[in-house]
Amino acid sequence: ELSEITIMSHLLKLYDEGESIDLNQFIGKADLEAVRKAKKTLGDPDKLKPYFEHFEEAIPYNAIKIALKIIENEQ
């Protein structure tokens, strides 16, 4: 009976700890690319809210968190 947010937080923590988790399975390519572009447009904000507002709430917080984690690990 865990919420989606809790489950995703646990998955991201395990990913950060080195577990082999394919985060791409949890986000569509279009959303990933949208977040990638927004990151440049918004100047790489520290918080998720600027992204959420940029997308007019169309991309959920969890998807934004996953996208940012994927982008972070590409660098």
Image (tube, helix red, strand yellow):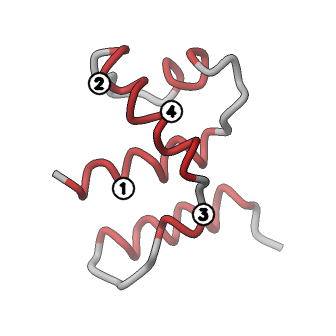
Query: What residue appears at the point 46 percent right and 34 percent down from the top-left corner?
Result: 35
Of the residues shown, which amino acid type is indicated by label 3? Phe
Q: Position of residue 61 (x, y in %)?
A: 61, 39
The residue to which callout 2 is attached is: 44
Residue furthest out toward the right? 1
Disc number placed over residue 34 in the picture, else none: 4
Q: Amino acid at mark 1?
A: Ile
Q: Secondary structure at mark 4?
A: helix
In front here: 13 or 36?
36
Determine whether label 2 and label 4 are within 8 Å by CB: no
Q: Residues within 10 Å of mark 4 (few under 14, many from 20)?
A: some
Q: Residues within 10 Å of mark 3 (few under 14, many from 20)?
A: few
Q: Which residue is mark 3?
A: 26
What numbered label is drawn on residue 10? none
Residue 70 shows which numbered tag?
1
Total marks placed = 4
